[in-house]
Amino acid sequence: MWSSLAVYKPRRDHIPTIFSWLECARQSPLSLYLHAPAGDNFEDQRAIAYILGFFLDSQRERQIKHITLKLAGEFPISVSPFFGSSTPRLKSVELDLHGPQDTMHVWRAFCNVGIPQVWWRPSGVLHTLPSMPWEALTRLRLPIATNEAGVSMTDLMKALLYCDRLVDLEIAMKMPLVDTFPSSNSPYTTEQYAGALLCLREYRKRTLPSEEYVMDSASLEMALSGPIDLPRLRHFKVQAHGRDSTPLLNRLSARNLTSLRIAHFNKDESTSPSTMDGIISLLERSQAQLTSLSIFDSKMPKSETVKLISCPQVVGLRSLELLIGPVGHSVLHPLTFTRKKRCMPGLRKLVLPGCIVKQGFLSGMLKSRRTTLQELTFTTARVTKELYQELSDMRRIAAESRVLLTID
């Protein structure tokens, strides 16, 4: 039996088929997808409304585990009547809603019934924080591609303020965002802003879903003056467009973080060089046992890469991906494992960019890690006679040590 049902550009004549397929899969866990681009056909708009309602109503009687709604234009949505007090089978929703109408009631309806995973493409949602049940989420994706809506760093921090149950967080944003509460100028102590954050979260949990939550301005200012603690966060992915992610990383703390993926895009010559300061600061502040780290930044200076892989906070890494510009001896040297220099002793997966080194450096690094390393991937520049011999040595070492070697 199929596990998903997708409807693209719904029409009225789709309805009997959709109903039939849902009936056939009544006892099977299903993921439902509804994608309706903007259109002027009134009959199609009615079909969208009917199918949407049918999808939402289906979670009562069927095993619906995921719903994706990607809707644009004028579409009638009424969600509340379709939900009871709980939806034990529905585990995640993805909402991508674009149109002139208010869609906040859709967000509230899904979150108020305790759905733990929400992917949201916000078009103003960060400005309506008091009524949003952020504290119910364990997984959250906020792809803010641009800052046209005027979303500030403060708006984002206010959203994350109550996300103390988050395990997975993904943010894509246009940088830099305006920050009206720069933590570097905070007049409060660590104990003060940590206490204010705890008080806000506890009071929030005691507020009924039907009540309008009003933030205490003094406590809010104090809590936002320091890093926002996300105590259960384990997986964090950031895509920063325009400059590096340091301003965002400086505002967070995550003591249980195990996986961090950072990507920097669309940087022009006028942008200041990337640094690893934000990443190192986050790891130092969090004191987390990071096991997986991925960095994508074609303009990251080699000196910054050396600074990162040499810091004590990455010693426990098992997976390291450096998707940056070409590197040389300065980067490979600290990656070479010796008795005196025990850098990342448990490293199992290593992905490197183009390597411009003399013969023996790459094969020496691989040989030093052959007892623990399981995968090595890297790209090569123009193959010279020396490099050809180096690659032959690496293939031999990899074969003897059972290391999966990939050369692009």
Image (spheres, helix red, strand yellow):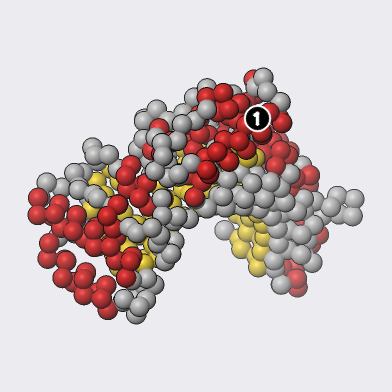
Q: Tell me the kind of residue under disc 1.
A: Tyr
The residue sitting at 75% across, 53% down in the picture is 316
The secondary element bearing badge 1 is classed as helix
Q: Position of residue 83 (x, y in %)?
A: 33, 57
Q: Above or below — where is 186 with respect to 161? A: above
Is residue 232 something that shows in the picture? yes
- 260 with respect to 27 (left or right): right
Assess disc 1: are there few (<14), some (14-19) or many (≥20) residues with their C-alpha within 10 Å of its C-alpha.
many
Q: Which residue is mark 1?
A: 193
Q: Quadrant of residue 98?
A: top left
Q: Above or below — where is 344 with respect to 158? A: below
Q: Position of residue 196 (x, y in %)?
A: 62, 31
- Given residues 215 and 263, the one toward you in this image is 215
Q: Position of residue 75 (x, y in %)?
A: 20, 47
- Given residues 97 and 209, the one toward you in this image is 209
- Given residues 10 and 384, the one toward you in this image is 10
The residue sitting at 36% across, 30% down in the picture is 148
The residue sitting at 70% across, 58% down in the picture is 318
Q: Quadrant of residue 121?
A: top left
The residue sitting at 12% across, 65% down in the picture is 13
